[in-house]
Amino acid sequence: MKKTGYQNNNLPNLGRWFNWGLNVENVKDLFFVTGHADVKADNSSANFPNDPVGQVKYILEQMEITFSQAGYTKDNIVSVNWCVTKDVTHEQTIKILKVWSEYIADVETKPSGGTWKRIHGLISPDVLVELEMILAR
């Protein structure tokens, strides 16, 4: 598989986080990661209640556990969709993007960013973030 990222000079350069476009050639397999949120195994509550930065760190760890079971790595991520509640502030968003930037720092070709959705609420009042991913190889 070969990934080529594309930026758009008329839009902000988000290269450390995402590519505005991503061409993926010679794909053999796709892997779809269902939305992950910071919920305990018994679905009782969040591990990091009302802490979107802690939630993102936890979510990324859990997603990697999920996709690594099928033999995928961070290098295989081609798209990420973000969903945050209206309670996530701009300052917290910057911190979330820093966590993401550190998570994919060693990924040569960054994935496409999908859509950053801001909604009223998620599965539980103390859950503020949910992520979905698509991986390819």
Image: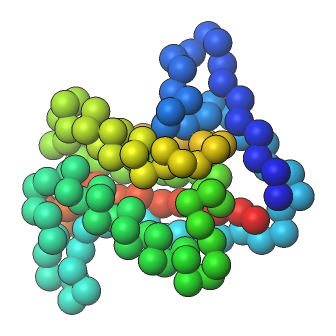
Q: Which of 124 and 40 is in front in this view?
A: 40
Residue 78 x/y as whole percent: 64, 52
Asked whether, in this view, residue 67 is left or right of residue 53, the answer is: right
Asked whether, in this view, residue 1 is left or right of residue 134, the answer is: right
Q: Which of the image's four quarters has the C terminus?
A: bottom right
Tell me where residue 91 sits by quadrant.
top left
Residue 21 x/y as whole percent: 69, 34
Tell me where residue 136 sits by quadrant.
bottom right
| Number of callouts | 0
The residue located at (20%, 51%) in the rendering is 52
- Using the rendered image of the protein, determine whether residue 115 is visible from the camera's viewpoint: no
Residue 69 x/y as whole percent: 56, 84
The residue located at (36%, 50%) in the rendering is 83
Residue lying furthest right: 26
Residue 53 x/y as whole percent: 22, 50
38, above or below 44, in the image: above
8, above or below 129, in the image: above
7, above or below 48, in the image: above
